[in-house]
């Protein structure tokens, strides 16, 4: 489990330096991109560990639940900083922005809810309680990744580099197509 906790270092660093960043939009964008990167990493981790045979990746793969929970923390901080830095906790302003960009905010909201449910159910008790539904629920990570790609394309490209988005979008599509291929077997 110790290996998985190292993934919190960028989170802690960003939290420590965030008061010194002059552009308030850069903070939520950074957490958003890191959250997407972490989700891609945790989703691809078993295949990367198997392919590379690197001991640290094999250990992280064994602690995949914790890696996933840490990934959710990046997404949660993205949401917190969006509400704080962009909307100043003004719910009316947030709802106006949502209604003006419904497609992009609704994809983010649905992705967040999927990731929240996955995080809440990332424990042995939930696995026993939900049985086959647990796996089905956790396979929704692929839908969440696709929704995040749409969200970043619509809203995040203002802050993200198009090449970063393209790289992450290709990785997302690769993981989704790979999952579909494995399900057909």
Image (cartoon, rainbow, N blue to C red):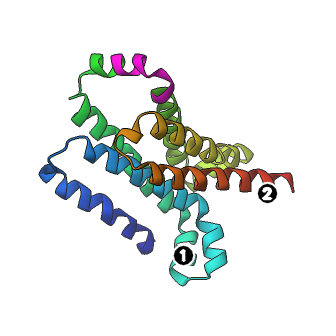
> Crowdedness of circle 2 by 10 Å Cα count: few (<14), some, many (20+)?
few
**Residue where numbered disc 1 is placed:** 57
Q: Secondary structure at mark 1?
A: helix
Magenta residues, start to end: 96-104
Q: Quote the CA–CA distance across marks 1 and 2.
A: 22 Å
Judging from the image, what secondary structure is the residue with disc 2 in? helix
Residue 107 visible, this angle = yes
Q: Is residue 60 left or right of residue 2?
A: right
* Numbered mark located on residue 95 in the image: none
Residue that carries the numbered disc 2 in the rendered image? 182
Disc 1 packing (10 Å; few <14; some 14–19; many ≥20): many
Residues marked 1 and 2 touching at CB (< 8 Å): no
Residue 71 in picture, x, y percent from top left = 45, 54
Q: Is residue 148 left or right of residue 88?
A: right
Residue 21 highlighted magenta (yes or no): no
Relative to residue 167, is residue 10 drawn left or right? left
């Amino acid at each position: 489990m110790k290996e998985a906790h190292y993934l919190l270092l960028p989170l802690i660093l960003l939290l420590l330096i965030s008061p010194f960043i002059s552009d308030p939009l850069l903070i939520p964008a950074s957490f958003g991109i890191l959250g997407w990167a972490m989700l891609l990493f945790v989703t691809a981790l078993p295949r990367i560990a198997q392919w590379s045979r690197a001991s640290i990746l094999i250990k992280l793969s064994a602690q995949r639940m914790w890696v996933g929970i840490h990934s959710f923390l990046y997404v949660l901080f993205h949401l917190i900083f969006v509400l704080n830095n962009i909307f100043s906790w003004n719910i009316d302003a947030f709802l106006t922005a949502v209604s003006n960009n419904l497609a992009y905010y609704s994809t983010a909201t649905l992705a967040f809810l999927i990731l929240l449910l996955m995080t809440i159910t990332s424990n042995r008790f939930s696995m026993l309680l939900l049985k086959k539904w647990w796996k089905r629920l956790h396979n929704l990570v692929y839908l969440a990744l696709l929704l995040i790609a749409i969200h970043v394309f619509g809203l995040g490209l203002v802050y993200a580099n198009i090449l970063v988005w393209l790289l992450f979008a290709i990785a997302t599509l690769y993981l989704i197509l790979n999952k579909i291929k494995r399900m057909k077997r």
